[in-house]
Image (tube, grey):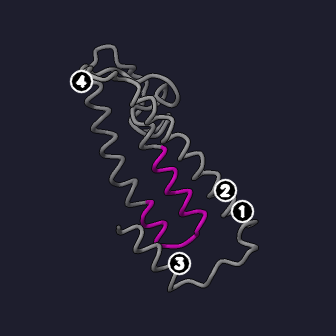
Amino acid sequence: VINGFSNGYYLGTLSEPYPVSWFWDVRFIVGILVFVAGAYINFSSDNILLALRKPGEKDYKIPYGGLFKYVSCPNLFGEILEWFGFAIMCWNLPALAFAVWTATNLIPRALSHHRWYLANFDNYPVSRKAVIPGIF
């Protein structure tokens, strides 16, 4: 709701319409590429998580495949990428604010999931980071 209102109000009321040439601006191109990459990572990671349990199963399992090789929560990494891509693509303060808001909410969640995996699985890959491959 907050994202829809703030970005919708800004884009629909406060800002000038983007010119057609904006579609060829490097910020738009980079932003849409980052957004699409994030959406793909998010979607494919969610599918890996959904496939972990068959109907009726209750056991927890370690996810493998895709970016799970590098991080515990690639779905959250993908969502963060999506919103930063959107912010780059739109190049406005409300979009950036929502991207930062998203990251500040999802990074602690990813850290919590990462700690849970480490505490509950003796064989959990210790080289995995929480949310940002190779960094965090």
Displayed quadrant of residue 100: bottom left
CA distance for labels 2 and 4: 38 Å
In the image, what residue type sits under mark 2? Val
Q: Find disc 2 in the rendering and name its residue.
A: 30
Q: Is residue 113 above or below residue 28?
A: above
Q: Find disc 1 in the rendering and name its residue.
A: 26
In the image, what residue type sits under mark 4? Ala
In the image, what residue type sits under mark 1? Val
Q: Residue at point 29% right, 24% down?
A: 118
**Of marks 1 and 4, which one's residue comes earlier in the chain?**
1
Q: Which mark is residue 11?
A: 3
Please report the bounds of the magenta region as a residue range.
78-99
Mark 2 vs mark 4, foreground winner is 2
Is 37 part of what is drawn in magenta? no
In the image, what residue type sits under mark 3? Leu
Mark 2 vs mark 3, foreground winner is 3
Q: Residue at point 44% right, 32% down?
A: 71
Q: Which mark is residue 119?
A: 4
